[in-house]
Image (cartoon, coloured by chain):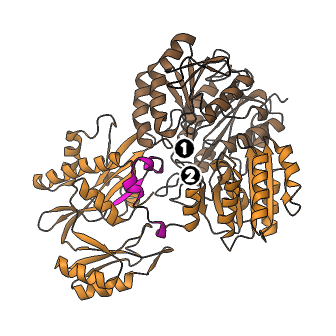
Amino acid sequence: MNIHEYQAKEIFARFGIPVPPGTVVTTPAEAESVAAKIGKPVVVKAQVLVGGRGKAGGVKIAQTPAEAKEKAAQILGMDIKGEKVQKVLITEAVDIAREIYVGVVMDRRAQKPLIMASAEGGVEIEITAVEKPQAIKRVHVDPLYGVHSFAARNLAAELADNAEQAKPMTDIIEKLYRVFMETDASLAEINPLVVTKDGRVLAIDAKLNFDDNALYRHADIEAMRDTDAEDAGETTARAEGLSFVRLSGNVGCIVNGAGLAMATMDLVKEYGGQPANFLDIGGSSRPEKVVTALTIITSDKSVRSILFNIFGGITRCDDVARGLVTAFNQMDLKLPVVVRLTGTNEKEAREILKQLPSLHTAETMDEAVKKAIQLAA
Amino acid sequence: MSILIDKNTRLVVQGITGRDGSFHASQMAAYGTNLVAGVTPGKGGTRFEDKVPVFDSVHAAVDATGANTSVIYVRAPFAADAICEAAEAGIRFVVCITEGVPVRDMLRVVPFLKERSTRLLGPNCPGLIAPNSKVKVGILPASIVLPGSVGVVSRSGTLTYEVVYQLTRAGMGQSTCIGIGGDPVIGTNFIDCLRMFQGDDETEAIVMIGEIGGSDEEEAAAFIKEKVTKPVVSFIAGQTAPPGKRMGHAGAIVTGGSGTAADKIKALTAAGVPVARVPSEITRLVAQSAPALKRA
């Protein structure tokens, strides 16, 4: 799960990482009054979950409250990579002397958290990694010990110009690691961490991504979820225990298991079609799940055919077939449906599906995919 | 011999009285696995299906039955603790089926197991099955396998079933089929399995099924080039996955341009591993790469 910058800054502040004062607002008038309260030039920053808002014009400096109002009016409602801006953060504009990058990520290969830092902040770390890999310092952390003070100190010494700067940087590195571990983050990033002209060290941006599997123990973070910024299908799917990702094609896919669901999408593409989505109905095959899956898929108006690819292992094919019958009875399904059911109880499933003569059936995954593409054309 | 499990496997099921645990305990025993014990705290002294003794702790189960392998079906918040309990009780091979275990929990489990020389398979995996010895630990359906000499290793569940089923239909039996799990931090990776298959007399060819996310496939490619002399055929799922989106599995995500299917296919191809474009091409590639393979 991702959260907005202003939310990540709230968490940073809770852990003692210095952030400039700011308030999130939803109207230009509020932007003006917040800017007046700050009493200094401000930055008006679009709060979106997608990256690249700066390049899209979603971050603007305002010298006066009136200007803040005007800039907020420009940014609110703006479309940034398909996400509509609903909130802006009004925050003090600081005089930047230097920009630094500090981030904590999960290194899957080492099976340890990894602190990455670069004296050249302000650019995406992925770009630095390609263009100037030697500029990135890496420190693995033993999760049983946490960050050793010496490791944070040594890293800060490489980033800082002098001992005066190094001290708060050491502190910020240690605290950022604590944020990462204690919130079950998969990414905790400050880009940039700035040194101001008057010598302060501040996190002027903040990014946190969380491990979805750990949200059950962080009710406060779960409450930060912005369902407005999220795809409606993904929200519905999550509530029902399904896994859904929208794509731009016209063949709707309903599959059991993530790997098979990915392979099914790939196959649609391979045979010249375009998958409309990734959808894993999971191990259990309660009829309600099939109904929810069909509801999500059919709400996408670009979908022209629906493909079921079920490999019954633990999932029983007859359960899925019953779900299909229930769904057909409940819903007024106009789209052609292709079904491929193989494995546990497939014979019983075939018997059940005889009740639905409009259904297209297929023996193999390849045949099912080809049929679904044809029907979508 | 198969890898990791065989006729000497003495299995304890952690979470044997739960819905999934009890169902699969029966399935494993019916297939031929030597199921010696179950563990559910608070249910010690009872018997599973009037036969298998249930204990309050893994320690008690090991003491009484000599269990040497464990499989875990407990809920995600308790899975890491269950893994550590098995290791502490002296179990040297633990299979964790549970899905949804937080990564932070696994970060602490990994060094704990290392100190005790315990191997973990999973979490979030279907386990493994050895058709020649009729032993299975986990949830892989026995109905789709065939005794033989192809080793199958995969990050997925149902996609593995699909591939195994196609191998079986083509008469290409399997030595061991292993699902290593779809999470970012797992106990046993592709290289571990490739090394074991390479050293396994029963295995003549290997099928490796990867997916987007991480760099396990790229590292496996380098290992194959250097150390694996047996033919390896691969398939990578997720070529159409958009970046930054988690595709069902916690570990199946392309982040910052890394972990793409294209990178993995490139690395494998460069290592001389044929990569199937579609799952149904795998059997043909196996037949080409291993012309001497015994077919049923």
Q: Which chain carries label 1?
A: B
Q: The brown chain is which one?
A: B
Percent across and percent down for residue B66 are 56, 12
Q: Is residue A271 visible?
A: no
Quarter of the image for residue B125 reads: top right
Q: Which numbered disc covers residue A333?
A: none
Mark 2 burial class by Cα count in 10 Å: few <14, some 14-19, many 20+: some
Percent across and percent down for residue A250 are 70, 69
Give left or right: position of A12 versus A201: right
Along the line of sight, which residue is nearer the eye, A248 or A91?
Answer: A91
Is A206 inside the magenta-drawn segment?
yes
Residue at 50% from the left image edge and 21% from the top image edge: B56
Q: Mark 2 lies on which chain?
A: B
Image height of A359 relative to B28, above or below: below
Residue at 39% from the left image edge and 59% from the top image edge: A131
Give left or right: position of A358 versus A98: right
| Magenta stretch bounds | A205-229
Along the line of sight, which residue is nearer the eye, A339 or B166?
Answer: A339
Gap between marks 1 and 2, in whole Å?
8 Å
- Hey, what amino acid is under mark 2? Asp
Percent across and percent down for residue A57 are 38, 79
Residue at 24% from the left image edge and 47% from the top image edge: A174
Name the secondary structure under disc 1. helix
Kindly check if marks 1 and 2 are in contact, taking CB atoms under 8 A apart as contact.
yes
Image height of A174 relative to B257, above or below: above
The residue indicated by pointer 1 is B218
Chain A display color: orange
The residue indicated by pointer 2 is B263
